Structures are given as C-alpha cells and as structure tokens.
Image: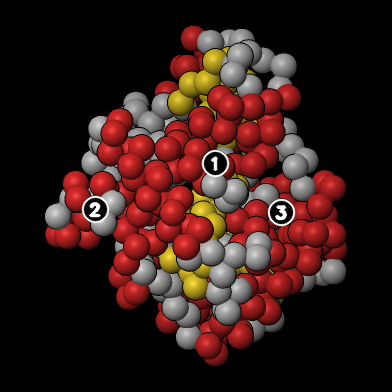
Amino acid sequence: MNELMNNFSATDVFSVKNEPLTEKEEINLRSEIEHLLSANNAVIIAHYYTDPKVQALAEATGGCVADSLEMARFGKKHPATTLLVAGVRFMGETAKILSPEKTVLMPSLHAECSLDLGCPKEEFNVFCDAHPERTVVVYANTSAAVKARADWVVTSSIAVELIDYLDSLGKKIIWAPDQHLGNYVQKRTGANMLCWKGSCIVHNEFKAKALFRMKKLYPDAAVLVHPESPQEVIDLADVVGSTSQLIQAAKIIKQQRIIVATDRGIFYKMTQLCPEKILMEAPTAGEGASCRSCAQCPWMRMNGLKTIFTGLYQGGKEHEILVDKELCRQALVPLNRMLSFASNLNIERNKIHT
Ligand code: 13P
Ligand code: SF4
C-alpha cells in the first residue's frame, strides 16, 4: 500500500471533502491520481469554473479544461475508456449520452446546477405540450430527461448563432431554462421565443448598480460578462460571451484592467493566457445583495483533488454516471444536432459579442 493510503484511514479517504491539503499531501494525492488515471485508462475533463488545482491537474495529465461544449466534444473523441468529469452533473450526463460505452465518473454526484434543478421534466413537458407548434431548444445545463424532450441542445457559446439560424427558418421557439440567456439571445436575434424562468444562482448575484460604480472607479477597465447574468449587468458589458469566449476576449482586448462577471475559477485560465492583465471580480454585493455564491459555484467547488481521487479509486454507485438507455437514445438526437451545428460554425465559434 502506498504512502497516501497509509496517511488516511479508510473512513477519512472515503468521506473526503476538499479541505486544504498540506504540500506533501497534495504531492502524494497528485501522484496517486496519475497512477489511477493510467491504470484505468482514464482522462480528466474539467470545466473552467473548477478549482485551479483541478484545472492544473487536468492539463498536466493530458486531459482538458474547457467550456461545456468543448468538454462534450473532448470526451466523445478521446480514446480513454473512463472519463472523469470534473464539473457538474449535467456535464457528466452529456459525456455519458455521447459515449455510452465509456465509464463516466464524477468526484461527486451531488454536484448539481440551479438551472437543471429549476427545470423538472414533468413541468417542462407540460410547458412544451401547451405549445406544440414551437421548436424546443434547451441549454446544456439540463437533465437528460429534459434534453430528451428537446429538438435542440445548445451551449452559451453558440446560442445566438443557433437561434438566429432557427429564426431564419421561420421557427418559433421554446427556450429553457435560463431566462437571462434567453432574453439576451432574443434581443440579439429578434426571434420569437417563449422563455422558461430559470436562473443561475452564481450569475444572478452580479449587481448592476455596484458594477456601474466600479466602472466609474476604474474608467479604463473593460467589463466581461457571461450571458447568464441579469440584463442590467449585460447592458454594462464591453464583451458578452461564454466562458471560452470571455477567456479569448481577456487575451485580445486592449484594456489592461478587466472586470469579470462570471465564476472566479475562470481567472486561472485568464491569468495563464494574459499574465500582464489586471483581473477583477465584478461585484456581487450592493443594494439587494444576499450573496449566497459570491462568484463561486458551490457545486463546481465539489471537485477537488481529494474527491477526484475518491471518484477514481472508488467508482461505483457513489461516482458513476448512469443514464437510462432509452433516455440516452432520445437525448442523443438534439445533442448530435448541437455538435454538428457547432462544427459547421467552428471557425466562427470564438467570435466575440460586443
Ligand atoms: P459554458 O457553457 O460557458 O462553459 O458555461 C457553463 C456554465 O455552467 C456557466 O455557468
Ligand atoms: Fe449551474 Fe450556475 Fe453553477 Fe454554471 S455556475 S453550473 S449555471 S449553478
């Protein structure tokens, strides 16, 4: 038995939370994870919002750090037989639907998403049944059952382009579940959209008045906003985009100082790509603030070195993503439509909306 296993009792290891590690524990844990990855022919697929240590590990071990669209694509094309998805549950489910033959593990199956939780399949089906003439477009941040009901799945990186395309075909749309992204896309495209009223507990916390005051304090700063934020916050943005688009923007925008309205996990990649820039968090405090998340998704934070280790070591019902075969078959249709639409757009995908 190796040093790491000697350092933890069985109960400690398997009830692990992501408490701070000593330097030695961290080195041991990383080497254990590397060993498990190669023993299980596994690869780590991490989202930009995860802890910087998780992102660094994914990069160092040949995995990927990406937005939700790229995570889906990477998992599908990578030859590994086990995918360790460090993100939230819908990302693990998407990976499983796209690669049903692979084992998909997650550090915690309790890593939810408020958008997914706010769009239960029974209510969503009633909503869709009431508008049978509409094309159903759902955000990737939904359960497999909700995707199974949809005509299209979409991520924020291609939402404007997809709705624009459907609008050009004369389609009327049901959009779910994020109301802010839906409103933003509707404004940009002029499409006929009926929006579900979900929201992200992280982006919902950004405050326009406080951001306005911050802009006054730093008139030289550029403001980068994820479109899950409220409209008044989007209205103050120099750039609106998905996580990957915001990272690109931070790199190429001429301003040295950048105020960022999205989860602070994104700073890892931004700092790596443009270390000379001054990055600041957009305010979550101010009038009406009740900050429960403070620019940090609580579910993304369930992914840490300890939980990745546990996920890989233990697997099984505590960590493995399983999706009903029939749901997989149904949800695959709109997911594949999204992937082929995205690959046709590929060259333009990182286009920045200002
Ligand atoms: P991206 O698709 O931009 O990665 O966003 C996913 C997400 O959950 C944002 O809150
Ligand atoms: Fe869901 Fe918001 Fe967390 Fe993204 S940041 S996973 S939308 S709760």
Along the horizontal axis of the image, is 20 left or right of 112?
Answer: left
Check contact, mark 1 vs mark 2: CB within 8 A: no
Question: Which of disc 1 and disc 3 is earlier in sequence?
Answer: 1
* Amino acid found under the numbered disc labelled 2: Met
Instruction: Name which residue lies at 67% across and 39% down.
Output: 245
Question: In the image, which is nearer the foreground, mark 2 or mark 3?
Answer: 2
Give neighbour class at mark 1: few <14, some 14-19, many 20+ (Cα, 10 Å).
Answer: few
Report the residue marked by disc 2: 5
Instruction: Name which residue lies at 74% across and 71% down.
Output: 337
Q: Nearer the viewer, residue 154 or 35?
A: 35
Which quadrant of the figure has residue 331?
bottom right
Report the residue marked by disc 3: 158
Q: CA distance from mark 1 to mark 2?
A: 22 Å
Q: CA distance from mark 2 to mark 3?
A: 44 Å
Disc number placed over residue 200 in the picture, else none: none
Classify 339 as above or below 71: below
Instruction: Name which residue lies at 35% across and 54% down.
Output: 309
Kindly state the secondary structure of the residue where label 1 is placed. Answer: helix
Quadrant of the rendering where the C terminus is positioned: top right
Q: Nearer the viewer, residue 216 or 59?
A: 59
Can residue 185 be seen here? The reply is no
Question: In the image, which is nearer the foreground, mark 1 or mark 2?
Answer: 2
* Amino acid found under the numbered disc labelled 3: Ile
Residue 158: percent from left, percent from top: 71, 54
Residue 350: percent from left, percent from top: 75, 42
Along the horizontal axis of the image, is 151 left or right of 265?
Answer: right
Question: In the image, which is nearer the foreground, mark 3 or mark 1?
Answer: 1
Give neighbour class at mark 3: few <14, some 14-19, many 20+ (Cα, 10 Å).
Answer: many
Kindly state the secondary structure of the residue where label 3 is placed. Answer: loop
Q: CA distance from mark 3 to mark 1?
A: 28 Å
Report the residue marked by disc 1: 60
